[in-house]
Amino acid sequence: MAPRRHIRVPVLGKAAPPIGSDFVSLEAASGIVLLLAAAAALIWANTDTAGYTSWWHRELTIGPGELAITESLVHWVNDALMTVFFFVVGLEIKRELVTGELRDRQRAALPAVAALGGMVVPALLFVAINLGGDGLDGWAIPMATDIAFAVGVLALLGPRVSPSLKLFLLTLAIVDDIGAIVVIALFYSRGLDGWWLLGAVAIVIVVIAMSRLGVDHPVAYVVPGVVLWWCLHEAGVEPTLAGVVLGLLTPARPRRGVPVLERLEDALHPISSFVIVPLFALANAGVALGGDAIEHALSSPVTIGIVVGLVVGKFVGILGASTLALRAGVGALPDGVALRHVAGIAVLAGIGFTVSLFISDLAFRGVEIDDAKIGVLAASAVAAVLGMIVLRVLLRGPVPKLTEDST
Protein backbone atom coordinates (compact mmCIF):
# COMPACT_ATOMS: atom_id res chain seq x y z
CA MET A 1 0.00 0.00 0.00
CA ALA A 2 1.64 3.20 -1.12
CA PRO A 3 2.19 5.76 1.65
CA ARG A 4 -0.24 8.64 1.53
CA ARG A 5 -0.77 11.79 3.51
CA HIS A 6 -2.14 11.64 7.03
CA ILE A 7 -5.54 13.05 7.93
CA ARG A 8 -5.51 14.16 11.53
CA VAL A 9 -8.72 14.50 13.50
CA PRO A 10 -8.06 17.42 15.91
CA VAL A 11 -10.99 16.73 18.24
CA LEU A 12 -9.61 13.27 19.02
CA GLY A 13 -6.10 14.48 19.83
CA LYS A 14 -3.80 11.64 20.79
CA ALA A 15 -6.66 9.20 21.29
CA ALA A 16 -6.67 8.13 17.66
CA PRO A 17 -3.47 9.26 15.94
CA PRO A 18 -2.79 8.49 12.30
CA ILE A 19 -1.23 5.05 12.04
CA GLY A 20 0.03 4.69 8.51
CA SER A 21 -2.12 6.26 5.80
CA ASP A 22 -5.16 8.47 5.39
CA PHE A 23 -7.29 5.35 4.77
CA VAL A 24 -6.12 3.73 8.02
CA SER A 25 -6.40 6.96 10.00
CA LEU A 26 -9.95 7.60 8.88
CA GLU A 27 -10.96 4.03 9.68
CA ALA A 28 -9.42 4.28 13.15
CA ALA A 29 -11.26 7.52 13.93
CA SER A 30 -14.52 6.36 12.34
CA GLY A 31 -14.44 3.26 14.54
CA ILE A 32 -15.03 5.53 17.53
CA VAL A 33 -17.96 7.25 15.81
CA LEU A 34 -19.36 3.88 14.79
CA LEU A 35 -19.16 2.67 18.40
CA LEU A 36 -21.05 5.75 19.59
CA ALA A 37 -23.73 5.24 16.92
CA ALA A 38 -24.19 1.60 17.91
CA ALA A 39 -24.46 2.59 21.57
CA ALA A 40 -27.02 5.26 20.68
CA ALA A 41 -29.06 2.70 18.73
CA LEU A 42 -29.08 0.30 21.68
CA ILE A 43 -30.08 3.05 24.11
CA TRP A 44 -32.85 4.27 21.81
CA ALA A 45 -34.18 0.76 21.15
CA ASN A 46 -34.21 -0.11 24.86
CA THR A 47 -35.69 3.14 26.17
CA ASP A 48 -38.30 3.64 23.42
CA THR A 49 -38.66 0.34 21.56
CA ALA A 50 -41.91 1.29 19.84
CA GLY A 51 -40.55 4.67 18.79
CA TYR A 52 -37.33 3.19 17.41
CA THR A 53 -39.19 0.54 15.43
CA SER A 54 -41.89 2.85 14.09
CA TRP A 55 -39.37 5.51 13.03
CA TRP A 56 -37.13 3.22 11.01
CA HIS A 57 -40.02 1.23 9.52
CA ARG A 58 -42.06 4.17 8.24
CA GLU A 59 -42.30 4.01 4.46
CA LEU A 60 -40.87 6.43 1.92
CA THR A 61 -41.69 6.37 -1.81
CA ILE A 62 -39.19 7.68 -4.33
CA GLY A 63 -39.57 7.78 -8.10
CA PRO A 64 -42.22 8.57 -10.71
CA GLY A 65 -45.34 6.52 -11.39
CA GLU A 66 -44.83 2.83 -12.01
CA LEU A 67 -41.08 3.21 -11.52
CA ALA A 68 -41.58 4.39 -7.94
CA ILE A 69 -39.96 2.35 -5.16
CA THR A 70 -41.51 2.20 -1.71
CA GLU A 71 -39.24 1.08 1.12
CA SER A 72 -38.96 1.62 4.85
CA LEU A 73 -36.42 4.17 6.07
CA VAL A 74 -34.12 1.42 7.32
CA HIS A 75 -34.09 -0.18 3.89
CA TRP A 76 -33.42 3.14 2.18
CA VAL A 77 -30.40 3.44 4.45
CA ASN A 78 -29.35 -0.16 3.77
CA ASP A 79 -30.10 -0.26 0.04
CA ALA A 80 -29.38 3.32 -1.04
CA LEU A 81 -27.00 5.11 1.34
CA MET A 82 -24.88 2.01 1.83
CA THR A 83 -24.25 2.05 -1.92
CA VAL A 84 -21.82 4.90 -1.22
CA PHE A 85 -20.08 2.73 1.41
CA PHE A 86 -19.70 -0.08 -1.11
CA PHE A 87 -18.52 2.42 -3.73
CA VAL A 88 -15.68 3.44 -1.41
CA VAL A 89 -14.93 -0.25 -0.81
CA GLY A 90 -14.81 -0.74 -4.58
CA LEU A 91 -12.44 2.21 -4.96
CA GLU A 92 -10.11 0.83 -2.29
CA ILE A 93 -10.14 -2.65 -3.86
CA LYS A 94 -9.35 -1.15 -7.29
CA ARG A 95 -6.49 0.92 -5.87
CA GLU A 96 -5.04 -2.07 -4.04
CA LEU A 97 -5.29 -4.27 -7.16
CA VAL A 98 -3.59 -1.73 -9.42
CA THR A 99 -1.10 0.15 -7.23
CA GLY A 100 -1.24 -1.38 -3.74
CA GLU A 101 -0.57 -4.57 -1.82
CA LEU A 102 -2.79 -6.82 -3.97
CA ARG A 103 -0.71 -5.98 -7.04
CA ASP A 104 2.22 -7.98 -5.63
CA ARG A 105 1.03 -11.59 -5.66
CA GLN A 106 3.81 -12.78 -3.39
CA ARG A 107 3.12 -10.19 -0.70
CA ALA A 108 -0.66 -10.57 -1.00
CA ALA A 109 -0.64 -14.38 -1.02
CA LEU A 110 -0.46 -14.99 2.74
CA PRO A 111 -3.10 -12.45 3.87
CA ALA A 112 -5.32 -13.59 0.98
CA VAL A 113 -5.09 -17.23 2.07
CA ALA A 114 -5.61 -16.14 5.68
CA ALA A 115 -8.73 -14.20 4.68
CA LEU A 116 -10.07 -17.22 2.79
CA GLY A 117 -9.60 -19.41 5.85
CA GLY A 118 -11.22 -16.69 7.95
CA MET A 119 -14.30 -16.82 5.73
CA VAL A 120 -14.67 -20.57 5.17
CA VAL A 121 -14.22 -21.83 8.76
CA PRO A 122 -16.75 -19.42 10.37
CA ALA A 123 -19.32 -20.28 7.69
CA LEU A 124 -18.79 -24.01 8.23
CA LEU A 125 -19.13 -23.66 12.01
CA PHE A 126 -22.35 -21.70 11.57
CA VAL A 127 -23.75 -24.33 9.21
CA ALA A 128 -22.77 -27.15 11.59
CA ILE A 129 -24.59 -25.47 14.47
CA ASN A 130 -27.69 -24.58 12.41
CA LEU A 131 -27.90 -27.76 10.33
CA GLY A 132 -31.50 -28.94 10.14
CA GLY A 133 -32.85 -25.66 11.52
CA ASP A 134 -34.38 -22.50 10.06
CA GLY A 135 -31.27 -20.34 10.39
CA LEU A 136 -29.11 -21.68 7.57
CA ASP A 137 -29.69 -18.56 5.47
CA GLY A 138 -27.40 -16.68 7.83
CA TRP A 139 -24.32 -18.79 7.05
CA ALA A 140 -22.43 -15.79 5.61
CA ILE A 141 -22.97 -13.49 8.62
CA PRO A 142 -19.81 -14.56 10.53
CA MET A 143 -17.62 -14.33 7.41
CA ALA A 144 -17.07 -10.56 7.55
CA THR A 145 -14.46 -8.47 9.37
CA ASP A 146 -15.17 -4.81 10.18
CA ILE A 147 -12.16 -2.73 9.10
CA ALA A 148 -13.14 0.38 11.09
CA PHE A 149 -13.43 -1.37 14.45
CA ALA A 150 -10.40 -3.62 13.89
CA VAL A 151 -8.17 -0.73 12.86
CA GLY A 152 -9.54 1.32 15.74
CA VAL A 153 -8.36 -1.30 18.22
CA LEU A 154 -4.94 -1.35 16.56
CA ALA A 155 -4.79 2.44 16.89
CA LEU A 156 -5.34 2.15 20.64
CA LEU A 157 -2.28 -0.13 20.86
CA GLY A 158 -0.08 2.70 19.63
CA PRO A 159 3.31 2.58 17.88
CA ARG A 160 4.06 -0.92 19.18
CA VAL A 161 2.02 -2.21 16.22
CA SER A 162 4.40 -2.39 13.26
CA PRO A 163 3.40 -0.91 9.88
CA SER A 164 3.75 -4.39 8.36
CA LEU A 165 1.19 -5.80 10.78
CA LYS A 166 -1.24 -3.00 9.96
CA LEU A 167 -0.82 -3.67 6.25
CA PHE A 168 -1.36 -7.38 6.85
CA LEU A 169 -4.67 -6.63 8.56
CA LEU A 170 -5.73 -4.19 5.84
CA THR A 171 -4.87 -6.61 3.04
CA LEU A 172 -6.71 -9.41 4.85
CA ALA A 173 -9.74 -7.17 5.40
CA ILE A 174 -9.82 -6.03 1.76
CA VAL A 175 -9.74 -9.64 0.51
CA ASP A 176 -12.46 -10.32 3.10
CA ASP A 177 -14.50 -7.48 1.56
CA ILE A 178 -14.07 -9.01 -1.90
CA GLY A 179 -15.33 -12.33 -0.55
CA ALA A 180 -18.33 -10.68 1.12
CA ILE A 181 -19.23 -8.85 -2.10
CA VAL A 182 -19.10 -12.08 -4.11
CA VAL A 183 -21.23 -13.90 -1.52
CA ILE A 184 -23.84 -11.12 -1.45
CA ALA A 185 -24.02 -11.07 -5.26
CA LEU A 186 -24.29 -14.84 -5.68
CA PHE A 187 -26.32 -15.97 -2.68
CA TYR A 188 -28.43 -13.04 -1.46
CA SER A 189 -30.16 -12.00 -4.66
CA ARG A 190 -33.92 -12.34 -4.94
CA GLY A 191 -35.75 -13.98 -7.93
CA LEU A 192 -33.95 -12.41 -10.85
CA ASP A 193 -35.74 -10.40 -13.55
CA GLY A 194 -33.87 -10.91 -16.82
CA TRP A 195 -34.94 -7.67 -18.52
CA TRP A 196 -33.89 -5.44 -15.63
CA LEU A 197 -30.64 -7.40 -15.34
CA LEU A 198 -30.03 -6.84 -19.05
CA GLY A 199 -30.65 -3.14 -18.45
CA ALA A 200 -28.01 -3.17 -15.69
CA VAL A 201 -25.50 -4.82 -18.06
CA ALA A 202 -26.27 -2.14 -20.67
CA ILE A 203 -25.58 0.63 -18.16
CA VAL A 204 -22.26 -0.98 -17.21
CA ILE A 205 -21.31 -1.02 -20.91
CA VAL A 206 -22.26 2.67 -21.14
CA VAL A 207 -20.08 3.49 -18.11
CA ILE A 208 -17.13 1.59 -19.60
CA ALA A 209 -17.59 3.44 -22.92
CA MET A 210 -17.71 6.81 -21.11
CA SER A 211 -14.48 5.95 -19.31
CA ARG A 212 -12.76 4.85 -22.52
CA LEU A 213 -13.85 8.09 -24.20
CA GLY A 214 -12.10 10.05 -21.45
CA VAL A 215 -15.15 11.26 -19.49
CA ASP A 216 -13.52 11.85 -16.11
CA HIS A 217 -15.80 14.24 -14.22
CA PRO A 218 -17.59 12.31 -11.44
CA VAL A 219 -20.86 14.22 -11.95
CA ALA A 220 -21.20 12.67 -15.41
CA TYR A 221 -21.51 9.26 -13.78
CA VAL A 222 -24.24 10.19 -11.27
CA VAL A 223 -27.18 9.53 -13.61
CA PRO A 224 -25.78 6.21 -14.96
CA GLY A 225 -25.00 5.22 -11.37
CA VAL A 226 -28.55 5.91 -10.21
CA VAL A 227 -30.01 4.03 -13.21
CA LEU A 228 -27.68 1.09 -12.51
CA TRP A 229 -28.84 1.02 -8.88
CA TRP A 230 -32.47 1.13 -10.02
CA CYS A 231 -31.97 -1.69 -12.52
CA LEU A 232 -30.27 -3.92 -9.96
CA HIS A 233 -33.00 -3.23 -7.40
CA GLU A 234 -35.73 -4.16 -9.87
CA ALA A 235 -33.73 -7.14 -11.16
CA GLY A 236 -33.67 -8.69 -7.71
CA VAL A 237 -29.91 -8.18 -7.25
CA GLU A 238 -28.63 -6.46 -4.10
CA PRO A 239 -28.59 -2.84 -5.39
CA THR A 240 -25.63 -1.71 -3.27
CA LEU A 241 -23.47 -3.76 -5.65
CA ALA A 242 -23.91 -0.84 -8.06
CA GLY A 243 -21.44 1.02 -5.85
CA VAL A 244 -18.91 -1.80 -6.07
CA VAL A 245 -19.23 -2.00 -9.87
CA LEU A 246 -18.72 1.75 -10.31
CA GLY A 247 -15.80 1.72 -7.87
CA LEU A 248 -14.06 -1.08 -9.77
CA LEU A 249 -14.61 0.75 -13.09
CA THR A 250 -13.00 3.95 -11.80
CA PRO A 251 -9.54 4.49 -13.36
CA ALA A 252 -6.86 3.87 -10.73
CA ARG A 253 -4.13 5.73 -12.60
CA PRO A 254 -4.24 9.49 -13.31
CA ARG A 255 -6.13 10.61 -16.39
CA ARG A 256 -4.52 13.65 -18.04
CA GLY A 257 -2.72 14.28 -14.77
CA VAL A 258 -5.91 14.04 -12.69
CA PRO A 259 -5.96 11.31 -9.99
CA VAL A 260 -9.64 10.48 -10.40
CA LEU A 261 -9.79 7.56 -7.98
CA GLU A 262 -7.86 9.31 -5.21
CA ARG A 263 -10.00 12.44 -5.51
CA LEU A 264 -13.19 10.40 -5.24
CA GLU A 265 -11.86 8.40 -2.31
CA ASP A 266 -10.65 11.51 -0.49
CA ALA A 267 -14.06 13.15 -0.98
CA LEU A 268 -16.31 10.20 -0.18
CA HIS A 269 -14.38 8.19 2.39
CA PRO A 270 -15.01 10.69 5.24
CA ILE A 271 -18.71 10.90 4.28
CA SER A 272 -18.99 7.12 4.23
CA SER A 273 -17.06 6.62 7.46
CA PHE A 274 -18.47 9.46 9.56
CA VAL A 275 -22.03 9.82 8.22
CA ILE A 276 -23.32 6.82 6.27
CA VAL A 277 -21.90 3.91 8.26
CA PRO A 278 -22.81 5.45 11.65
CA LEU A 279 -26.32 6.13 10.30
CA PHE A 280 -26.44 2.48 9.19
CA ALA A 281 -25.44 1.45 12.72
CA LEU A 282 -28.10 3.71 14.23
CA ALA A 283 -30.75 2.13 11.99
CA ASN A 284 -29.64 -1.48 12.39
CA ALA A 285 -27.87 -2.03 15.71
CA GLY A 286 -30.91 -1.22 17.83
CA VAL A 287 -32.31 -4.37 19.43
CA ALA A 288 -34.34 -4.63 22.61
CA LEU A 289 -32.22 -6.46 25.17
CA GLY A 290 -35.00 -7.46 27.50
CA GLY A 291 -34.91 -10.69 29.48
CA ASP A 292 -37.00 -12.60 26.94
CA ALA A 293 -34.87 -11.46 23.99
CA ILE A 294 -31.61 -12.39 25.68
CA GLU A 295 -33.01 -15.71 26.90
CA HIS A 296 -34.19 -16.55 23.38
CA ALA A 297 -30.86 -15.51 21.88
CA LEU A 298 -28.86 -17.61 24.35
CA SER A 299 -30.66 -20.73 23.12
CA SER A 300 -30.87 -19.69 19.46
CA PRO A 301 -28.64 -21.63 17.03
CA VAL A 302 -28.43 -18.42 14.97
CA THR A 303 -26.90 -16.43 17.82
CA ILE A 304 -24.65 -19.28 18.91
CA GLY A 305 -23.52 -19.91 15.33
CA ILE A 306 -22.59 -16.25 14.82
CA VAL A 307 -20.69 -15.96 18.11
CA VAL A 308 -18.82 -19.22 17.59
CA GLY A 309 -18.19 -18.37 13.93
CA LEU A 310 -16.76 -14.92 14.61
CA VAL A 311 -14.89 -15.55 17.87
CA VAL A 312 -13.64 -19.09 17.28
CA GLY A 313 -13.98 -19.55 13.53
CA LYS A 314 -12.10 -16.41 12.54
CA PHE A 315 -9.22 -17.27 14.86
CA VAL A 316 -8.98 -20.91 13.76
CA GLY A 317 -9.50 -20.09 10.08
CA ILE A 318 -6.99 -17.24 9.80
CA LEU A 319 -4.27 -18.74 11.97
CA GLY A 320 -4.77 -22.24 10.57
CA ALA A 321 -4.74 -21.11 6.95
CA SER A 322 -1.67 -18.93 7.57
CA THR A 323 0.21 -21.81 9.20
CA LEU A 324 -0.65 -24.22 6.38
CA ALA A 325 0.26 -21.65 3.73
CA LEU A 326 3.65 -20.98 5.30
CA ARG A 327 4.41 -24.69 5.55
CA ALA A 328 3.41 -25.12 1.90
CA GLY A 329 5.62 -22.21 0.85
CA VAL A 330 2.66 -20.07 -0.25
CA GLY A 331 3.54 -16.46 0.51
CA ALA A 332 5.66 -15.27 3.43
CA LEU A 333 5.25 -13.32 6.62
CA PRO A 334 5.97 -9.59 6.16
CA ASP A 335 9.12 -8.24 7.73
CA GLY A 336 8.45 -7.31 11.33
CA VAL A 337 5.60 -9.81 11.66
CA ALA A 338 5.77 -13.20 13.39
CA LEU A 339 3.12 -15.93 13.37
CA ARG A 340 2.18 -14.99 16.93
CA HIS A 341 1.19 -11.54 15.67
CA VAL A 342 -1.03 -13.17 13.05
CA ALA A 343 -2.71 -15.00 15.95
CA GLY A 344 -3.54 -11.64 17.53
CA ILE A 345 -4.90 -10.30 14.24
CA ALA A 346 -6.97 -13.50 13.90
CA VAL A 347 -8.66 -12.79 17.23
CA LEU A 348 -9.28 -9.16 16.27
CA ALA A 349 -10.79 -10.21 12.92
CA GLY A 350 -13.76 -11.59 14.83
CA ILE A 351 -15.15 -8.05 14.92
CA GLY A 352 -17.76 -8.39 12.19
CA PHE A 353 -20.04 -5.43 12.82
CA THR A 354 -21.03 -3.52 9.66
CA VAL A 355 -21.13 -6.14 6.89
CA SER A 356 -22.35 -8.83 9.32
CA LEU A 357 -25.34 -6.66 10.24
CA PHE A 358 -25.86 -5.91 6.56
CA ILE A 359 -26.01 -9.62 5.67
CA SER A 360 -28.26 -10.25 8.69
CA ASP A 361 -30.79 -7.87 7.16
CA LEU A 362 -30.58 -9.73 3.84
CA ALA A 363 -30.87 -13.18 5.42
CA PHE A 364 -33.55 -12.87 8.09
CA ARG A 365 -36.85 -11.37 9.12
CA GLY A 366 -38.76 -11.52 12.40
CA VAL A 367 -37.24 -12.83 15.62
CA GLU A 368 -34.26 -14.38 13.82
CA ILE A 369 -32.93 -10.97 12.82
CA ASP A 370 -32.90 -9.93 16.50
CA ASP A 371 -31.04 -13.14 17.37
CA ALA A 372 -28.56 -12.36 14.59
CA LYS A 373 -28.03 -8.78 15.76
CA ILE A 374 -27.44 -9.89 19.34
CA GLY A 375 -24.97 -12.47 18.07
CA VAL A 376 -23.07 -9.92 15.96
CA LEU A 377 -22.94 -7.36 18.78
CA ALA A 378 -21.86 -9.90 21.38
CA ALA A 379 -19.24 -11.53 19.16
CA SER A 380 -17.81 -8.20 18.04
CA ALA A 381 -17.52 -6.98 21.64
CA VAL A 382 -15.82 -10.21 22.75
CA ALA A 383 -13.44 -10.19 19.77
CA ALA A 384 -12.51 -6.55 20.36
CA VAL A 385 -11.71 -7.09 24.05
CA LEU A 386 -9.89 -10.39 23.48
CA GLY A 387 -8.01 -8.95 20.50
CA MET A 388 -6.84 -5.99 22.56
CA ILE A 389 -5.68 -8.24 25.42
CA VAL A 390 -3.99 -10.84 23.20
CA LEU A 391 -2.17 -8.25 21.08
CA ARG A 392 -1.01 -6.35 24.16
CA VAL A 393 0.50 -9.56 25.51
CA LEU A 394 1.98 -10.72 22.22
CA LEU A 395 3.48 -7.34 21.34
CA ARG A 396 5.46 -7.26 24.58
CA GLY A 397 7.93 -9.72 23.13
CA PRO A 398 10.70 -8.85 20.68
CA VAL A 399 9.43 -7.83 17.27
CA PRO A 400 11.43 -9.02 14.25
CA LYS A 401 13.47 -6.15 12.84
CA LEU A 402 12.56 -4.60 9.54
CA THR A 403 14.89 -5.30 6.65
CA GLU A 404 15.94 -2.74 4.08
CA ASP A 405 13.62 -4.35 1.54
CA SER A 406 10.58 -3.56 3.66
CA THR A 407 11.31 0.10 4.10
Image (cartoon, helix red, strand yellow):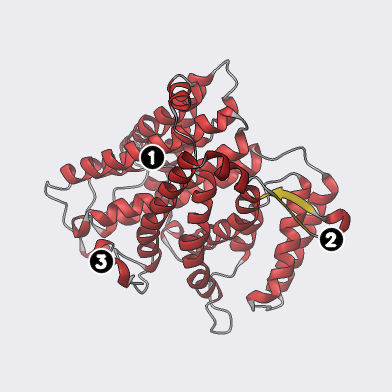
Q: Is residue 28 left or right of residue 76?
A: left
Q: Split into 4 quadrants, where in the image is the N terminus?
A: bottom left
Judged by depth in the image, the label closer to the viewer, 1 or 2, is 2
CA gap, disc 1 and disc 2: 41 Å
Between 126 and 97, the one lying in front of the other is: 126
Asked if one can make out residue 106 in the rendered structure from this viewpoint, the answer is no
The circle on residue 407 is 3
Residue located beneath label 2 in the image: 64
Please report the residue visible at 57 percent of the width from the left and 28 percent of the height from the top. 367
CA gap, disc 3 and disc 2: 56 Å
Residue located beneath label 1 in the image: 380
User: Which residue type does callout 3 highlight?
Assistant: Thr
Please tell me which of labels 3 and 2 falls first in the chain: 2
Percent position (x, y) of residue 62?
76, 58
User: Which residue type does callout 2 highlight?
Assistant: Pro
Instruction: Tell me where residue 360 sits by quadrant.
Output: top right
Please tell me which of labels 1 and 3 falls first in the chain: 1
Percent position (x, y) of residue 53?
59, 42
CA gap, disc 1 and disc 3: 33 Å
Between 290 and 220, the one lying in front of the other is: 290
Percent position (x, y) of residue 128?
49, 20
Mark 3 closeness class: few <14, some 14–19, many ≥20 residues within 10 Å: few
Instruction: Tell me where residue 65 sits by quadrant.
Output: bottom right
Q: Is residue 202 left or right of residue 53?
A: right
Please report the residue visible at 52 percent of the width from the left and 68 percent of the height from the top. 268
Q: Split into 4 quadrants, where in the image is the C terminus?
A: bottom left
